[in-house]
Image (cartoon, rainbow, N blue to C red):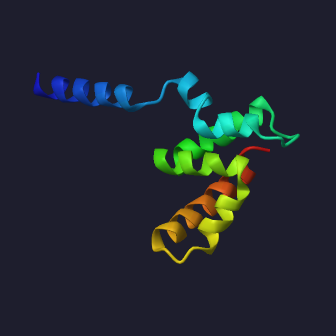
Amino acid sequence: MKLFMTIALCAGSLVALAPAPAEAASGTINRACRASDRPAASRELCSCIQRVANKSLSRTERRKVAKWFADPHQAQQIRMSDRSSDEQLWLRYKAFGQKVHATCR
């Protein structure tokens, strides 16, 4: 009985934490991508980028990065910043970009 309860609690936690498919497809990165003026910003590509972002970046980071679609200068400011938190974000963003490039062709 104890084992059953443990399994049930773990399964319930996973279901509660997993994003719904519609939510994953319509995240901040996806919306920013679709709203951008880039000709290659298709529904499929933007959804793929969102899926990679969900796995690579925190929610806060995804919100910050989404703003870069409309204002790329913000990304440049982060890249050039001397703050260690900005440097860490830039490194994660670069890794995210590499994953997008490898995954979303």
- Viewer-proximal residue among 40 and 60: 60
Provide residue 26's location: percent of width, then percent of height.
61, 28
Provide residue 101's location: percent of width, then percent of height.
74, 53
Residue sticking out furthest to the right: 39
- Residue 98 vertical placement versus 82 (above, below): above
Quadrant containing the N terminus is top left
Q: Is residue 58 something that shows in the picture?
A: no
Left or right for 43, reference 84: right
Kindly identify the residue that appears in the image at 54 percent across and 26 percent down.
Answer: 23
Q: Is residue 55 something that shows in the picture?
A: yes
Provide residue 4's location: percent of width, then percent of height.
18, 23
Kindly identify the residue that appears in the image at 63 percent across and 67 percent down.
Answer: 77
Left or right for 67, reference 54: right
Kindly identify the residue that appears in the image at 54 percent across and 45 percent down.
Answer: 63
Residue 28 location, quadrant: top right
- Viewer-proximal residue among 102 and 17: 17
Residue 90 location, quadrant: bottom right
Left or right for 55, reference 44: left
Provide residue 57's location: percent of width, then percent of height.
52, 50
- Residue 93 vertical placement versus 21 (above, below): below
- Viewer-proximal residue among 100 and 89: 89
Kindly identify the residue that appears in the image at 27 percent across and 31 percent down.
Answer: 10
Residue sticking out furthest to the left: 2
Quadrant containing the C terminus is top right
Left or right for 2, reference 16: left
- Residue 54 vertical placement versus 72 (above, below): above
- Residue 25 vertical placement versus 32 (above, below): above
